[in-house]
Every structure is written in structure tokens, then in C-alpha cells.
Image (spheres, helix red, strand yellow):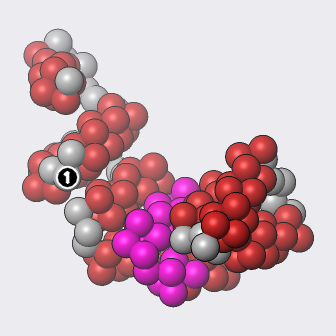
């Protein structure tokens, strides 16, 4: 129902109701999921011309768009901009977005490199990060790596969930099948 949402977004102006950053973020998110990079860029420009400054969520959604459209160089440039910006600092969601994109493409070195940046820039790995790597290793049938990563994250203070342990068990099972 993206078209309906866009239509309502445009109607807001007819009723002298100016969209706020939350409205923009919702539309940017859905356009990004659809891979509509051109439309996101136009919306981004419109938002800024209306004096609405992008927030952390908005930048994170742009990162997600670059990952969805396989523009990892652009995603990394944006991440580096966020890391060095005085106004927008990436959070764990931003890093996890890039990690997930790398893992989806089976680029483990790049995913681990991004993982290493999390703490360097003042974030803490979270349960989502743990489960992304656990799922990756599990799908490859590398149960020992799943277990080692789980242990590493627990030592860092991440509280594993039932899902984390289930993924670990599945990875161990897959490893034994071979």
C-alpha cells in the first residue's frame, strides 16, 4: 500500500498539515525497502528544503536503502560520515544493517570488520548482532563458530536469548550431519 501512503503524504499539504520527520522516516523506509533510491533522494531533498533536518533514524534508513540496493560503497561512505559527524552518531542498528547486508552476501570478513567498528565508535554489540552472526555460521553448518561467537558475546555482556541458543544448537546439529 505504498502508493496509498504516498497519496496521503501528499494530501497532508492540501490540509495545511506539514509532514514532520516521523512522516518522512516512514515514507523513506518504505520507499527504501522497495529499492526506490531516486524517489528517496527527491524526498530527502524536499525534506531538507522544508527545513526538516534528518535524524539518526533517517540516516539509518538511508543506510538500509544502500544495503538493499547493493550499494555497499555508498553505505560505508554514509557510515563514515555518521561516525565523524558531530550531530549524527551511528547506533547499533546502523552497524547491524551493514553487517546483515554483508552476511547476506556471504562477505564474512567485511561483516567482522564492521563488527569491530561498533565498539571503536562507542556502541555496544547487541542481541541482534549476536543472532546475525550466529545465524550466518549456523547456516554454513559451522556449529563450533556459532558456539564460540555466542560465548564471546556473552562475555561482552550481551544477554543471549532462547533464539540465540536455538541457533547455536541448530548450527551444531548441521555440523554433525556432514
Residue range of the region highlighted in magenta in the rendering: 88-112
Q: Please tell me in which quadrant of the rendered image residue 14 appears.
A: top left
Residue 107 in the figure: left or right of residue 95: left
Residue 98: within the magenta? Answer: yes
Image mark count: 1
Residue at the disc numbered 1: 35
The location of residue 61, given as percent across then percent down, is 37, 52
Residue in the foreground of this view, choosing between 16 and 39: 39
Residue in the foreground of this view, choosing between 21 and 108: 108
The location of residue 156, given as percent across then percent down, is 84, 70
Residue 103: within the magenta? Answer: yes
Image height of 60 relative to 98, above or below: above
Question: The C terminus is located in which quarter?
Answer: bottom right
Which secondary structure class fits the magenta region best?
A: helix
Crowding at mark 1 (Cα within 10 Å: few <14, some 14-19, many 20+): some
Visible residue check, residue 127: no
Image height of 167 relative to 103, above or below: above
Residue in the foreground of this view, choosing between 71 and 40: 71
Residue 79 in the figure: left or right of residue 114: left
Amino acid at each position: 500500500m505504498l502508493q496509498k501512503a504516498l497519496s496521503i503524504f501528499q494530501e497532508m499539504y492540501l490540509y495545511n498539515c506539514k509532514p514532520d520527520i516521523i512522516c518522512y522516516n516512514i515514507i523513506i523506509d518504505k520507499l527504501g525497502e522497495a529499492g526506490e533510491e531516486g524517489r528517496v533522494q527527491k524526498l530527502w531533498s524536499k525534506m531538507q528544503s522544508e527545513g526538516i533536518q534528518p535524524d539518526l533514524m533517517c540516516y539509518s534508513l538511508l543506510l538500509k536503502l544502500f544495503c538493499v540496493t547493493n550499494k555497499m560503497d555508498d553505505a560505508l561512505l554514509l557510515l563514515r560520515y555518521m561516525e565523524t559527524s558531530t550531530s549524527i552518531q551511528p547506533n547499533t542498528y546502523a552497524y547491524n544493517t551493514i553487517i546483515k547486508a554483508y552476511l547476506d552476501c556471504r562477505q564474512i570478513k567485511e561483516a567482522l570488520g564492521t563488527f569491530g567498528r561498533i565498539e571503536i565508535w562507542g556502541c555496544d554489540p547487541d542481541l541482534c548482532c549476536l543472532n546475525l552472526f550466529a545465524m550466518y555460521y549456523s547456516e554454513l553448518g559451522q556449529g563450533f563458530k556459532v558456539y564460540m561467537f555466542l560465548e564471546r558475546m556473552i562475555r561482552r555482556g550481551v544477554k543471549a536469548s532462547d533464539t540465540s541458543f536455538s541457533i547455536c544448537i541448530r548450527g551444531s546439529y548441521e555440523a554433525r550431519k556432514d
